[in-house]
Image: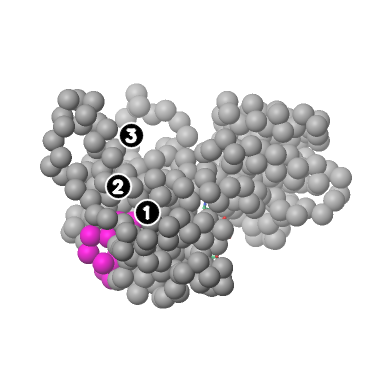
């Protein structure tokens, strides 16, 4: 099947070619993101593969359908970038990578917590400049403290399991509580209690209308003073302006984000020689207690291998008319 693959980096190209070897699809790689200006590149391709920041709004989906596309194969777990109602209206089917490596994201979240709490990123900079001063680098023991997990699905539970191993008390909040979370010692509470009790909060729920800005003025007002907040899920879960105010008020003790509400204009490219016009992200990086990474939590060899293999398998299943096990219901 002819597949137009958007937002392709060198590593995607290598691993997708490898995964495709036994499937024989005709892959056309585009470095460009898919959006209104680039959608003509997909004309005549029955399948299109996209990534997290491609613009899959109603106009783009309508143009894809008009150009003969029938399947969107996103190389991600999250599908908040795809307007599912519009996809349904255009008769487009959507497949994702339901499960690639909860460990990749959960382990990265733990890495962010350790670095944020113990200021490892700052120590790295200091020692390279010959500064061995400890002032400003004091953290706290995680052991015996409380971690709150918002979204106790595959990644949230994997994360909770690791944090329980650190000797932390684990609280959870989920619209659909899981007995597996309780079995590993977690206790479900409501959002206000989770915020008030937790020394560390980590976000692992999807971005939906119900979870957009789940961390905002109200939830931050309830936060335990000095709390560390970590987001490896989706930028829109946090009201960034409210988080900045909470950092300025010293209510938040630190913020580590791998995802950012306006990341589509910034992430996955080298802008080091450009002037960044997003004042919010510039304000965020000016805080000594903010740690920002560019949506890399998924980025392990193991996860990438599975993402590419599953994407190709999704396309093959669609081509053969077999059940699309990773279909996103529209
Ligand atoms: P999952 O579907 O296994 O778990 C999501 C959990 O969130 C479920 O338990 C669900 O009940 C819960 N949830 C849904 N609505 C909720 C609400 N209103 N309030 C509280 N909880 C709610 O998904 P998985 O695999 O654990 O992934 C979680 C998220 O992680 C994805 O949606 C994606 O946004 C993000 N992600 C980020 C990556 C990165 O590289 N930074 C990579 C992969 C996923």
Q: Nearer the viewer, mark 2 or mark 3?
A: 2
CA gap between label 1 and label 3 equals: 24 Å
Res. 189 visible in picture:
yes
- Mark 3 = which residue? 276
Q: Nearer the viewer, residue 250 or 80?
A: 250
Q: Which residues are magenta?
A: 218-229
Distance between the alpha carbons at the discs numbered 2 and 3: 24 Å
Q: Comparing marks 1 and 2, which lies closer to the viewer?
A: 2
Magenta stretch: residue 221 in it?
yes
How are the residues colored? one colour
Q: Quadrant of the N terminus?
A: top right
Badge 3 marks a residue whose secondary structure is loop
Relative to the observer, which residue lies in front, 278 or 298?
Answer: 298
Q: Position of residue 91 (x, y in %)?
A: 75, 54
Q: Can residue 176 be seen? A: no
Across and down, in percent, residue 170 comes to 41, 66
Q: How far is the residue under mark 1 from the one under mark 2?
A: 9 Å
Q: Are marks 1 and 3 in contact (CB under 8 Å)?
A: no
Helix, strand or loop at disc 2?
A: helix
Is the C-beta separation of discs 1 and 2 under 8 Å? yes
Seen at 47% across and 40% down, the residue is: 296
Residue drawn where x is 61% and y is 31% of the image = 12
- Position of residue 11 in the picture relative to residue 310 (left or right): left
Q: Earlier in the sequence, mark 2 or mark 3?
A: 2
Residue at (31, 57) in percent of width and height: 142
The numbered mark, 1 or 2, whose residue comes first in the sequence reads 2
Q: Are marks 2 and 3 in contact (CB under 8 Å)?
A: no
Counting from the top left corner in percent of width and height, residue 68 is at: 77, 41
Tag 1: Cα neighbours inside 10 Å, few (<14), some, or many (≥20)? Answer: many
Q: Mark 1 sits on what residue?
A: 230
The residue carrying mark 2 is 116
């Amino acid at each position: 099947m002819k597949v137009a693959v958007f937002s392709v980096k060198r590593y995607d190209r290598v691993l997708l070619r490898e995964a495709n070897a036994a499937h024989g699809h005709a892959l056309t790689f585009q470095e460009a993101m898919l959006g209104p200006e680039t959608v003509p590149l997909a004309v005549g391709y029955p399948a299109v593969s996209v990534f997290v920041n491609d613009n899959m709004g109603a106009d783009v989906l309508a143009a894809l359908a008009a150009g003969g596309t029938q399947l969107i194969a996103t190389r991600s777990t999250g599908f908040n970038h795809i307007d599912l109602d519009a996809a349904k209206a255009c008769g487009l089917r959507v497949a994702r990578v339901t499960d690639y490596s909860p460990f990749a994201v959960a382990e990265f979240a733990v890495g962010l917590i350790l670095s944020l709490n113990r200021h490892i990123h700052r120590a790295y900079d200091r020692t390279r400049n010959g500064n061995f001063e400890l002032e400003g680098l004091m953290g706290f023991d995680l052991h015996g403290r409380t971690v709150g997990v918002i979204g106790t699905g595959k990644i949230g539970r994997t994360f909770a399991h690791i944090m329980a191993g650190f000797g932390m008390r684990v609280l959870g909040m989920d619209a659909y509580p899981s007995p597996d979370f309780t079995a590993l010692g977690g206790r479900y509470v409501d959002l206000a209690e989770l915020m008030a009790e937790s020394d560390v909060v980590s976000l692992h729920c999807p971005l939906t209308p119900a979870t957009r800005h789940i961390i905002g003025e109200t939830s931050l007002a309830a936060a335990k003073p000095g709390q560390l907040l970590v987001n490896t899920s989706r930028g829109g879960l946090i009201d960034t302006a409210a988080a900045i105010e909470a950092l300025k008020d010293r209510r938040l003790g630190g913020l580590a984000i791998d995802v950012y509400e306006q990341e589509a204009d910034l992430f996955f490219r080298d802008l080091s020689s450009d002037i960044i016009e997003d004042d919010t992200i510039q304000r965020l990086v000016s805080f000594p207690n903010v740690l920002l990474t560019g949506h890399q939590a998924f980025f392990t060899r193991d996860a990438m291998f599975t993402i590419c293999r599953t994407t190709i398998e999704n396309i093959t299943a669609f081509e053969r008319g077999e059940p699309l096990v990773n279909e996103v219901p529209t």
